[in-house]
Image (cartoon, grey):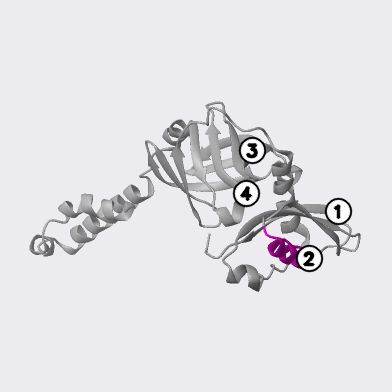
Amino acid sequence: MLFASARIRTSSRCITTSRATALGRRELFAVLFLLSLTIQARAGRVVGPDAELRKALIGTWEVQLPAREFFPLKKGFSTYRGDGRFQQLAIGDMSGVDMRVDMEGRWTVQNGVLTETITNAPVSSAVGKSDRSTVISLEPNQVTLLDEKKRRVTLQRSTLPKNLPRVSPLMSELLRSTQLKKDYAIYTPEPRYPYSSFKNNREGKGIFRVIVNQDGTVRAVEVVRTTGDGDLDQAATTALQHWRFKAGLVKSLVTPVIFTMHRL
């Protein structure tokens, strides 16, 4: 849409083919060159200068979180303050009870890129890390970003819920475990959908704790939050018992397991 709108605004300056051919080669080249610069400038700077971006971003924004990737987190909020600090919180459903996890840091905008550096987080290894996202669209109540993995992220102007749920240690443990899995997991097979559950359209979402031996093999699997179906719990436990990690680096972690008949 950005490039389309640039073409629409500049199309009236193209005059007509007959008049353009009447121009000399040098003049025609100059017109086309300037026109291309105009289009590039409009397409690249639609969002405005950095100072305007920083001013526009101040406030609270809601971020929708993909269910499969972030379960049991379901809502995220980012609040950018004028002093260069930001706060992020995520709300998740733990067996029907909403709980949350918080994170803090510093933010800035340079050359149209939003940089967020974490200063306080449940995952200690995340402290000091920076995320960079290019601002590709800015509206009064919506911002579209392109993150470092080339994924579009939409922020919607919002306010924090009036009655925020309490901070959950289990939520924090889930985030820490996600990092442990990313850094040290060697083999993490997914569970097979039990035929009996699949046949009867039974679904479930559970959370399991994996206890790891010194050599990186799994010693035990505990059900932290049941899927609500015994066969699904057993299928998850069986798969998790085959997980493997780098030796001596992981003692335990928690992980969500989702059984669904449909794509999330």
Mark 3, Cα crowd under 10 Å, few <14 / some 14-19 / many 20+, is: many
Sequence-wise, the earlier of marks 2 and 3 is: 3
Say what amino acid the circle numbered 2 marks: Trp
Mark 4, Cα crowd under 10 Å, few <14 / some 14-19 / many 20+, is: many
The numbered disc on residue 243 is 2
Q: Which residue is mark 3?
A: 100
Residue 85 x/y as whole percent:
59, 30
Closer mark to the observer between disc 1 and disc 4: 4
Sequence-wise, the earlier of marks 2 and 1 is: 2
Residue 110 in the image: above or below residue 22: above
Residue 167 x/y as whole percent:
68, 34
Nearer to me, 140 or 171: 171
Say what amino acid the circle numbered 4 marks: Pro
* Badge 2 element: loop
Residue 226 in the image: above or below residue 91: below
Sequence-wise, the earlier of marks 2 and 4 is: 4
**C-alpha separation, residue under disc 2 versus residue under disc 1:** 13 Å
Q: Which residue is mark 1?
A: 251
Nearer to me, 233 or 65: 233
Q: Dividing the picture into quarters, in which one does residue 223 lie? A: bottom right
Say what amino acid the circle numbered 1 marks: Lys
Say what amino acid the circle numbered 3 marks: Arg
Mark 2 vs 4: CB contact within 8 A? no
Residue 188 x/y as whole percent:
73, 66
